[in-house]
Image: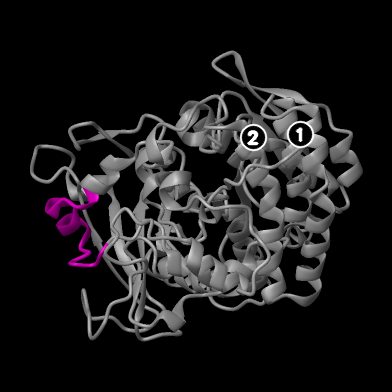
Amino acid sequence: MGFSKTSLPLFLFFILFSVSYATSRIINHARFPSTTFSPNQQAEKLIRSFNLFPKQSVNVIHGDHSLDHFLPGKIVEKKFSFFGDSGGPSIEDLGHHAGYYSLPRSNSSRLFYFFFESRKNNKDAPVVIWLTGGPGCSSELALFYENGPFKIANNLSLVWNDYGWDKASNILFVDQPIGTGFSYTSNEDDIPHDETGVSNDLYDFLQEFFKQHPKFIKNDFYITGESYAGHYVPALASRVHHGNKGKKGITINLKGFAIGNGLTNPAIQYQEYSQFAFDNKMITKQDQADINKLIPDCEVAIKTCESKGGESCSSALYQCEQIINNILSISGNVNYYDIRKKCQGPLCYDFSNLEKLLNKKTVRDALGVGDIDFVSCSRVVYNAMLQDWMRNFEVDIPELLEDGIKVLIYAGEFDFICNWLGNSKWVHAMGWSGQKQFAASKTVQFVVDGKQAGLLNSYGPLSFLKVNGAGHLVPMDQPKAALQMLANWMHGNL
């Protein structure tokens, strides 16, 4: 079989916000040929500008810039209301906050965040942080299209999301790493290159956040995210857990973490693409046999990445992406975030109202972001993290399980790009004291409104949930089920 010469844009493999920049709009290139270019040079050559706001590909502010008087390691925050003076809830009643955190390691870098207190005014509700994938994408898509308090109406007004996760928690949405969303820097060297840098920045932010909001210190704390957050989430959970063990700073009451349709263990997950594609009639049996010939080289490349690091990890990404590229070249105009659908236009999904909303002066004034450009997905941040992609972050999880930290891995059944099969395989293969019991656990129905909404396996602190009727963006596709999943899991009733 001869493989087609079209391939998927690298940037879009595992992003949560990625769907804003679907394949053909960004790059359409042949399968990676032999070249004298380094992987980083290839990426620079292949990836075009793909920001909703293409003025910059990263928020780098030249010269002095200040939204307020910043001190390193401190937060500047304001309460806000998107409802203005239109007769909606008051600012005080809402408990909605937007702010900047000045990174202590730099005089020039600020993390932007939203914080929404529990809509039910439950002072004991858990604190949840949501991390968008990428690497290098903003949290605002999740906020406005998935699990935040609001959804964007066609006339750009905001309506309450009946299934926002603020109904079950106090929830943080953070634009990270530096350079994404409304976060910014005046020095590109401040952009982290790996999960150590990312998790240290987030840990420092959480320390200051709880200092500013001491009434939430005692509340249970959960880390959640989607897609490339399959890297971010376990890395941050490990950082918080070790910080607590070391008794440094505020003890964060970490109870668990959840990853939705994530990329966590590439060595296992890349092996399952062809099987998922065949099971879902995306390719034939012969196609699968031909594509499987690419797996050994991918496995070798990942092992080299694990042992040598550096450029070998970038090379592993390019080697392994051929598996995905060839499946998608055969399957045609499939929406690889939801294989039930076709890509409609250049974006696969239409999230254009987000751009329009965040360009409104009233919104920017409400948030206090001044003239900072919004960068939805950053090429510079993406490139900075190239050597992080093929790393295995399952390795951080067993210690957390043994110490009683709850772990939920969930996946929509119709996502191809971070599919449920690959996620199930690494979860079942993970070595920990409950591995055999988890593998032997009975698969039970996850029920919403008296109907099956998913299939669940659990043992001890570990749960895996395959969500019915959902693609890559579970809270968008099945909002009621996603909210019930979160609430049940946090309360130990999943």
Q: Nearer the viewer, residue 450 or 21?
A: 21
Looking at the image, which residue is at 36% across and 50% down? 140
Q: Is residue 311 left or right of residue 251?
A: right
Is the N terminus in the top left, top right, bottom left or bottom right quadrant?
top right
Q: Is residue 375 left or right of residue 169?
A: left
What x and y, as percent, mark residue 422?
A: 73, 42
Residue 169 shown in magenta: no
Check the image and name the residue furthest to the top.
450
What x and y, as percent, mark residue 436?
A: 91, 42
* Tag shown at residue 287: 1
Looking at the image, which residue is at 51% across and 26% down? 341
Let me know if residue 328 appears in the view: yes
Q: Crowding at label 2, few (<14), some or many (≥20) Cα neighbours within 10 Å?
A: some
What x and y, as percent, mark residue 132?
A: 48, 53
Looking at the image, which residue is at 56% across and 68% down? 42
> In the image, which residues are magenta?
357-373
The residue identified by callout 2 is: 330
Check the image and name the residue furthest to the front.
2
Looking at the image, which residue is at 13% across and 54% down? 361
When the figure is inspected, residue 341 is found, relative to residue 259, above or below; the finding is above
Residue 364 shown in magenta: yes
Q: In the figure, residue 459 lies in which quadrant? A: top right
Q: In the figure, residue 80 lies in which quadrant? A: bottom left
Q: Is residue 486 left or right of residue 150?
A: right
Amino acid on which disc 1 is placed: Asp
* Tag shown at residue 444: none
Q: Crowding at label 1, few (<14), some or many (≥20) Cα neighbours within 10 Å?
A: some
Amino acid on which disc 2 is placed: Ile
What separation in Å lies between label 1 and label 2 (alpha carbons)?
8 Å
- Circles 1, 2 touching at the beta carbon (< 8 Å): yes
